[in-house]
Amino acid sequence: MQTPSAVLDVQPDTVPEYLNADPKLWWEVQQFLHYEADLLDSRSFDTWLTLLDEQIVYRMPLARNVRRDAVATEYTRPGETAWFDEGIETLRQRVAQINTGIHWAEEPASRISHLVSNVRIMNVDTEAEGGEQVSVRSRFLVYQNRLQGEVSLFVGKRQDVLRRSGAGWKILSREIFLDQNVLLAKALTTFF
């Protein structure tokens, strides 16, 4: 995947991709992402897991402060250190741990709100192995409140690849680009 900085580059003499997006597909994808956010906010983690493809790559690279001429290296690459670099098994284990009720950083449970916006269809591959795949870019803001006054805000960008299955969409990959290079929260227990 490209870094967010590289993805956001605009080529002056090309037709912007958003002009080619099918509004019906965009609406369908946006509704899927909002449904996913509702599941996470309502702590329906087992149902959320059903939205993930068995081959999912779920990754949150680290951000680094870099010079403008090195912006392509702002985020760590696959194989380098990351906040998350998981597949379906580790995601299932995280959900199972939270569901025990004895997860130290989630007992009592956090109150969380996911806001997903700026959803854009970047590419549609109708010939992809396993079914139609859609590359999606979005922005997120995640608000987390624990105990009386412990508040964490997570803001950033996401790059998803969704695969259409018989039951609807599945998340094949998610790369989460947090807009902070020092984690200000005490723990990363939420899903993005």
Image: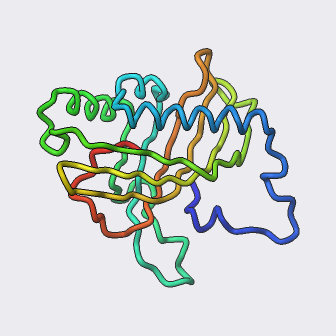
Quadrant (top left/top right/bottom left/bottom right) for the C terminus: top left
Residue 93 lies left or right of residue 8; in this view the side is left
On screen, 6 above or below 188?
below
Tell me which residue sits at (84%, 47%) in the image. 20
Q: In the image, what residue occupies the spot 50% across and 44% down?
A: 174
**Residue in the image at 30% along x and 43% along y:** 111
Q: How many marks?
A: 0
The furthest residue to the front: 148
Q: Where residue 80 appears, x then y in whole percent?
A: 37, 59
Q: Position of residue 61 (x, y in %)?
A: 41, 58
34 relative to 79, above or below = above
47 sits left or right of 18 in the view: left
Relative to 74, residue 122 above or below: above
Q: Nearer the viewer, residue 181 or 119?
A: 119
Please indicate whether residue 111 sits to the left or right of residue 165 in the image.
Answer: left
Q: Residue at x 44, y 45 (%)?
A: 114
Q: How is the image coloured?
A: rainbow
Image quadrant where residue 153 sits = bottom left
Residue 96: image location, x then y, percent: 24, 27
Q: What percent of the width, then of the height, locates residue 176?
A: 46, 52
